[in-house]
Amino acid sequence: MNHLQALEAYSIFILREAYKKLGRLGLLWSIGKDSTVLLWLTKKAFLGHCPFPFVHVDTSYKIPEMIIHRDKVAKEMDLELIVHQNVLALESGMGPDKGRLICCKALKTDALNEVTKKYGFDGLIVGVRRDEEGSRSKERIFSERNQDDEWDYANQPPELWGQFKTEFPRGHHIRVHPLLQWSEIDIWRYVENEGIELIDLYFAKNGQRYRSLGCAPCTGKIESQATSVSQIINELENTSVSERAGRAQDQEDAYAMQKLRRDGYM
Amino acid sequence: MNNQNKSFQTREKLKLVFTGHVDHGKSTVIGRLLLDSGALPQGAVDKIRRVSAETGRPFELAYLLDAFEEEQAQGITIDTTQLQFKTAFRDYVIIDAPGHKEFLKNMISGASDAEAAFLVVDAERGLEEQSKRHAHMLALLGLQQSALIVNKMDLVGFSQQVYQQTVEAARYFLSSLGLKLSVAVPLSALMGLNVTVKAPELSWHDGPTLLEALDSLKKSGHSHEAPLRLPIQDVFKFDDRRVLVGRVESGQIAVSDSIVISPGGKTAQVVSLASWLPRDQKTKAETGESVAVIISEDFFNRRGEIVSRIERAPKTVNRFRASIFWMGRRPLKAERRYKLKLSTAESECEIVKLFNLIDSSTLKPLQAQGEVGFNEVAEVEISLQKELALDLFSQCQATGRFVLVDDLDVAGGGIVTWAEDKPQVKAGFVHGELKARCELFQEYFYDLDRMTFNKIESSVPFYAVGDPVPLSGESYLYPEFFDIVIFRDQIVVKIRDGLVGALSPFSEYRYEGYPLVNGRGFAVKVNSEDDWLKLNNELLLINNRERAVGPDEKWLDFNVYRRIRLGRDRHL
């Protein structure tokens, strides 16, 4: 097996483990490249089926093309799609002008926590990767969140030999991270090998493209001429800029992501 | 696929863990390696500079890995980190493991993923408690390769003598654990000496730099000779197919292979390997692949059973010995019950014996007190509530290791060091492929002194067609003509004139007017073909694929052929 085949096989193992061992499952789907790869791996793991709903936490500030693409793929793939918004916060005028971290907390973290409670999820499958940023590099594959969706990151249980955290009190849930050991370039190489269709925001138009997708006000484009997957791979092989450099919320504070994620951010 | 991509596909990836005592500089060594080899994204160093400026702390290379605020504030690694790194030769996953005693569980979480380990030792302080404890854990985790980094050479004036003494001490300790030292490197991570380029201060060192040492480690491949082990993870029934899914932990599986499923010993052939996309269709899968297998028999199979080849099946046991390490806050206690998880199988278990308790950092024996404390290591004997299929760790790592769950968390890990295979069918009848279990000729005694019920196995375990059977014993008497109905195996054995006449599956059996007896020697109250059909209809309602069960009590009578003898000695 080569490196990508090994990553694929392990991710499928993780997805099947979550399906067998956790009760009610949902897959957090953000329309981006990672969660689209996750959708693809789910199809492979369950022989063409998607035996759990896909959840999109919609902040209402997403880049509009993302919503169009979301609905198109959900229809084509016949996904059970749950779209959730923190309606109260939006009605009271929440937005990035209130402070980026405050906005992320309300429209992403709190909305995610609401939808988790509303559907009683025991497991949420999330496409985060270790190489994205520091607090994610410390994650477990099965990572517990308490009844308030908090992550006790300083006291994580051991995880070894493919034996995951599957025992937890009622009301807690497990974040399942099947892509944790993938890198950004692994994702692109896999997209190329498998011929996975991605939203075209990733491909350069007028010398610019998105490298990481998020909310329109807080996500920047990068200078790029890459208009195909292989050109993106080539670009990434020669860059020394980090993937989330264009995500404004990460840059707010030295420990911004750790603080957001402690409270339940994905 | 372009050429560049192809060369990537064949690039090797090695997972390396850096271990050692707290403050000996593991995170700094890795930070230096990343910085000097140009593996860091542009923003990473700027971010550390910014953190230093914001918090007023000095610039620390270790912050590249110690991402948590608490880690940076306290200057220690709390949890393990993995990051990717590449040399011209191959790709690496570098795993940083905490050295502090409190966080041994995190070190183990990191190291359990690795293929080779670097032990980082401070030149001035030598091998300390956690260095030794970590080495011990590496041995228990089954790591094949270990390498040594003697860091902070600047603190000992770059002394060759100090270096050599440290290497010898490490070599000696590692060999006592059965670990071999592959390579050793003196360096100063703080000053960046002998990390990626040779240093004049260490001109006496004719060995490799750290970067060269990394590339000198060998990746161990999966042996095609290894026995097949496919633990069943789940059974899918999305359509009319029953599909066994799981990860091949050892060996290979191919279409038309004859396989056996343990425990239980049911045999079948591999019909096909299923996939979503037609282009993923294959006829063979190797170690590490997640597969979906369709087999020739429509057995009820369950998670935790292991698919193997018939000639090299795993052991089926309910008791075994193991070396364990304990990471739980409260000690492991003999006679307390734990959940044991071994590959995909689970069972309640009990530690029935505890011996050779040792201090994992000095290897000195500790006084066994009926418990194993935090970070300690012991030899134990474990009794399982149900039979599991497993291997000795030395023969197959993936199915020879397990974790123990205390309350809700994994609190211990262990490797199987001794297990005695239990015969799959202890006693019964055989005829070609047909096998039926029975306890018909066991003697039953009630021990008056101990007030316990004892069973004594018959001296002949198996009877074949034509063999005479012992019709009378001390606690039973059967007629010369009767039919033995073995509900568990759905087989009827005909006894004619005291000899085994024939074995026939339920579906082919017709009532012939002889008395019926179940596999344990109880009379079955069937006196006509109608009774037999009625009984079968009842069984159809209660039986499922999981297990064939016997009939309701109303159909059975213990007292016809059997009685319980009273006896003081079980060997009466």
Image (spheres, coloured by chain):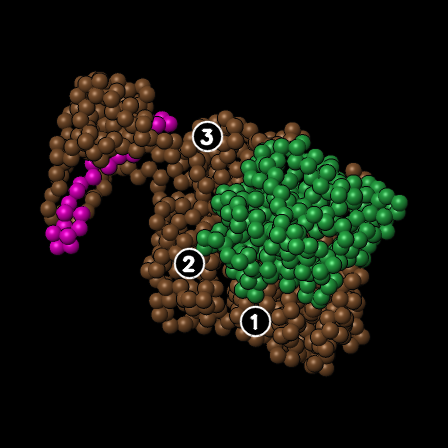
Residue B529 coordinates in the image, percent (x, y): 22, 17
- Earlier residue among tags 2 and 1: 1
Would residue B376 be seen by someone viewing this image from the given angle? no
Q: Chain of mark 2?
A: B
Look at mark 1 in the image and give the residue it sits on.
Answer: B100
Q: Chain of mark 3?
A: B
Answer with the quarter of the image where residue B287 lies.
top right
Q: Is residue A117 magenta?
A: no
Look at mark 3 in the image and give the residue it sits on.
Answer: B268
Asked if residue A125 lies left or right of residue B55, the reply is left
Q: Nearer the viewer, mark 3 or mark 1?
A: 1
Q: Nearer the viewer, residue B207 or B120?
A: B120
Q: How many numbered marks does the figure carry? A: 3
- Earlier residue among tags 2 and 3: 3
Residue span colored magenta = B428-453
Determine the residue located farthest toward the front in the rendered image.
A92
Q: Amino acid at mark 3?
A: Ala
Look at mark 2 in the image and give the residue it sits on.
Answer: B407
Q: Is residue B438 magenta?
A: yes
